[in-house]
Image (cartoon, rainbow, N blue to C red):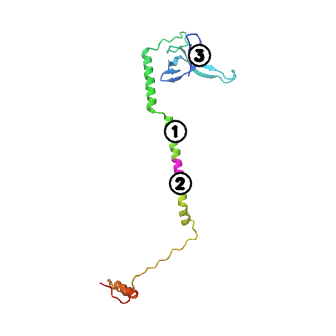
Amino acid sequence: MKLLRFFEDNHIEIAEGSLTSGVIKVNETEAYRADSEAIGFFIHAPYFGFGKPKREPILTTRVGDATPLYPINENYLSKNVVTEEELKDFENASFLETQLKIEKGDTGSKKLQEKIMLIVMGILAGAFAVIAIFSGLPMFKDNVLNFTREQPVQAEPIQATPIENNNGGTNAIFEEQNKIQSELYGDQQPAR
C-alpha cells in the first residue's frame, strides 16, 4: 500500500508500506494506523498518459503522527487521535505476530528441505534399482533367456542290497559288509 507523507518542512513523499494487523508499517520506526475511511486512491496512467490508468490505494499521513489524515473530508484532521494505549496495543500485536512467525518457523526452508529429501530418496531408489538389475542379469540370462535348456537327469532309485538278501533285520547288511571285506582283504572274519 502507498503512503502520501507530509513532512514538517512542507515537502511530500510517496512511500511503500506494508499492512499488518491494523497498522501500515513504513520501516522499523515509522508506522500509521490503518483506517478504512482514510484510504483514498492514487490514479496514474503509465506511458505518458497513453496507457490504461492504474488505481492504487493510498493513505495520507503526517510524519511523526500515527493518526491518518482525511483529505477528501472538509475537516481533514481525524477526530480519533491515536492514544498511548492504542500504540501499546499495536506494539503488542506486532510482538505477538513476530513471536508467531518465530514459533511457526521459516516454512520456506522446511519446504526446501522436504524437496531435497525427496530428490535424495529418488536418487537412492534409482541407484538401488540399477544395482538390483545388474546383479540379477546373470541369473535372468541363465534361467529365462537360455533357450537350449538341458533336460534334467532322470534319477533312478538305487537299492543298497538286493531284495533277496533283505530279511527284515540287520543280517542282510552284515552279510553284504562281510562280502565286501572278503573281496578286499581276503577271507578274514572281522572282530566282533
Identify which residue is drawn at 59% across, 14% down: 12
| Residue underneath mark 2 | 129
Residue in the foreground of this view, choosing between 51 and 181: 181
Question: In the figure, residue 2 lies in which quadrant?
Answer: top right
| Residue underneath mark 3 | 13
Q: What is the x, y in percent for residue 58?
A: 57, 19
Residue type at numbered disc 2: Ala
Q: What is the x, y in percent for residue 1?
A: 56, 22
Residue type at numbered disc 1: Leu
Give the crowd class for mark 1: few <14, some 14-19, many >=20 residues within 10 Å: few
- Nearest to viewer (mark 2 / mark 3): 2
Residue in the foreground of this view, choosing between 94 and 81: 94
Quote the CA–CA distance across marks 1 and 3: 39 Å
All told, the count of numbered labels is 3
The magenta stretch is 121-127
Question: In the figure, residue 92 lies in which quadrant?
Answer: top left
The disc, 2 or 3, on the residue closer to the chain's N-terminal end is 3
The disc, 1 or 3, on the residue closer to the chain's N-terminal end is 3
**Split into 4 quadrants, where in the image is the C terminus?**
bottom left
Q: Is residue 89 left or right of residue 149?
A: left
Query: What secondary structure is marked by label 2?
Result: helix
Q: Is residue 65 left or right of residue 179?
A: right
The circle drawn on residue 112 is: 1
